[in-house]
Amino acid sequence: QKEVEQNSGPLSVPEGAIASLNCTYSDRGSQSFFWYRQYSGKSPELIMSIYSNGDKEDGRFTAQLNKASQYVSLLIRDSQPSDSATYLCAVNGGYSTLTFGKGTMLLVSP
Amino acid sequence: DAGVTQSPTHLIKTRGQQVTLRCSPKSGHDTVSWYQQALGQGPQFIFQYYEEEERQRGNFPDRFSGHQFPNYSSELNVNALLLGDSALYLCASSRTEGVNEQFFGPGTRLTVL
């Protein structure tokens, strides 16, 4: 059974701080990793994808992957109240099927 | 560039009924995956369609069935609805070749009474 684990939160950070979201996965053969943002009542929106060990930066977002530790993280710099949402970690399970964690709720206070 | 579209937005059914949900993929995408998201949970993979065939299936009973049409659009059918089928049903499209990122539609909120 492939599993993806996330802390459900909520993770509370003040505006302007760095938010750090973490995820571990069980399938050592996983090759593709994704972070989705989901606002309440809306569908998931892809914000980052990462395929190799190391860091990948896109604007205020940095995804980090450590396959040896089976660990993926998402850093959000200069957090804004509009970043308040649930962040879903997803791992490719073959043929582009995704296994999701339960998500971490992020609250950014002004 | 139109994104993934789904219909209807909301649906209310009673136990034992049948429901059909529809999805049109993003332009240029040929693969459609369906997910069920219960409240407070991450999406759960139902099945994936490519070349009009079911390519992968998650741990869902055969009350859940689907179809993909030649224009890559897809349907999800659920028979003999149970209260526990109440959820947000998400369609995601992707390309089989190249980068395998999946993009979600707005979802269909199904309520079973």
Image (cartoon, coloured by chain):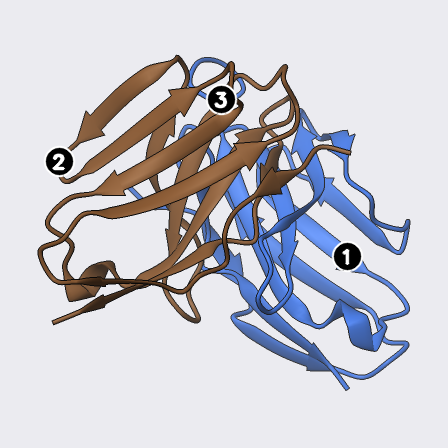
Chain colours: A brown, B blue
Q: Mark 3 — residue?
A: A32
Question: Tag 2: residue type?
Answer: Gly
Q: Quadrant of the C terminus of chain A?
A: bottom left
In this rendering, the label closer to the viewer, 3 or 1: 3
Measured as percent of width and height from the top left, residue A46 is found at 37, 42
Image point 85% across, 71% down: which residue?
B81
Q: Quadrant of residue A94?
A: top right
Measured as percent of width and height from the top left, residue A59 is found at 13, 36
Question: Tag 1: residue type?
Answer: Asn
- Using the rendered image of the protein, determine whether residue B28 is visible from the camera's viewpoint: yes
Q: Mark 1 — residue?
A: B77
Q: Secondary structure under badge 1?
A: strand
- Please report, as a chain letter, where disc 3 is located: A
Image point 77% across, 86% down: which residue?
B113
Question: Tag 3: residue type?
Answer: Ser
Q: Secondary structure under badge 2?
A: loop
- Using the rendered image of the protein, determine whether residue B26 is visible from the camera's viewpoint: no
Would you place residue A84 above or below residue B43 in this image? Answer: below
Q: Is residue B90 left or right of residue B15?
A: left
Q: Mark 2 — residue?
A: A59
